[in-house]
Amino acid sequence: MNSDRRDHLPGSSQAVYAISVAAELAGVGVQTLRLYEQHGLLTPARSAGGTRRYSGDDLARLERIVALVAEGINLAGIARILELEDANTALTAERDRLRARQEADMTGDGRAAEAKAKVRDRQA
């Protein structure tokens, strides 16, 4: 695919897929998508008229749900798994942010090293 065509594709968070398209792409029925929404597994965006619109991110989450269902996990279990995965993703992002900040402080003007030395001196 050339870059001109990619420029016209929706972003992963842009909700553009109707429920019938999302169901077809996931290989499940429309009622199944509604059931997943009832159980809080998916939260599609809504158009001004109230129509469900699914994003690429929603489709990726839906793919994970379908895989877990195929493994025989019930919907309550899937909700917990997704909750833990979401928390893990958030914590990983926070850790990475803090590491980057720490590295920036370390390579900065030496204030971080001075602060560590002061802490060591106070503890001694």
Image (cartoon, helix red, strand yellow):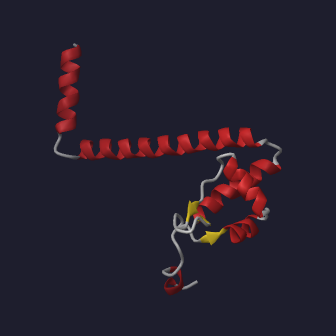
- The residue drawn where x is 49% and y is 86% is 4
User: Which residue is situated farthest in the front direction here?
Assistant: 49
- The residue drawn where x is 60% and y is 43% is 85
Q: Where residue 86 sits in the image (x, y, percent)?
A: 56, 44
Tell me: residue 76, above or below residue 58: above
Q: In the depicted view, which residue is nearer to us: 88 or 47?
A: 47
Q: In the depicted view, which residue is nearer to us: 43 or 90?
A: 43
Tell me: residue 48, above or below residue 98: below
Q: Where residue 40 sits in the image (x, y, percent)?
A: 64, 47
Q: How many marks?
A: 0
Q: Quadrant of residue 26?
A: bottom right
Q: In the depicted view, which residue is nearer to us: 13 or 31?
A: 31
- The residue drawn where x is 51% and y is 70% is 11
Tell me: residue 123, above or below residue 47: above
Q: Where residue 39 sits in the image (x, y, percent)?
A: 69, 45
Q: Quadrant of the N terminus?
A: bottom right
Q: Left or right: 32 with respect to 79?
A: right
Q: Left or right: 86 with respect to 80?
A: left
- The residue drawn where x is 72% and y is 58% is 33
Q: Where residue 62 sits in the image (x, y, percent)?
A: 68, 57
Q: Quadrant of the C terminus?
A: top left
Q: Left or right: 114 with respect to 39?
A: left
Q: In the depicted view, which residue is nearer to us: 104 or 3?
A: 3
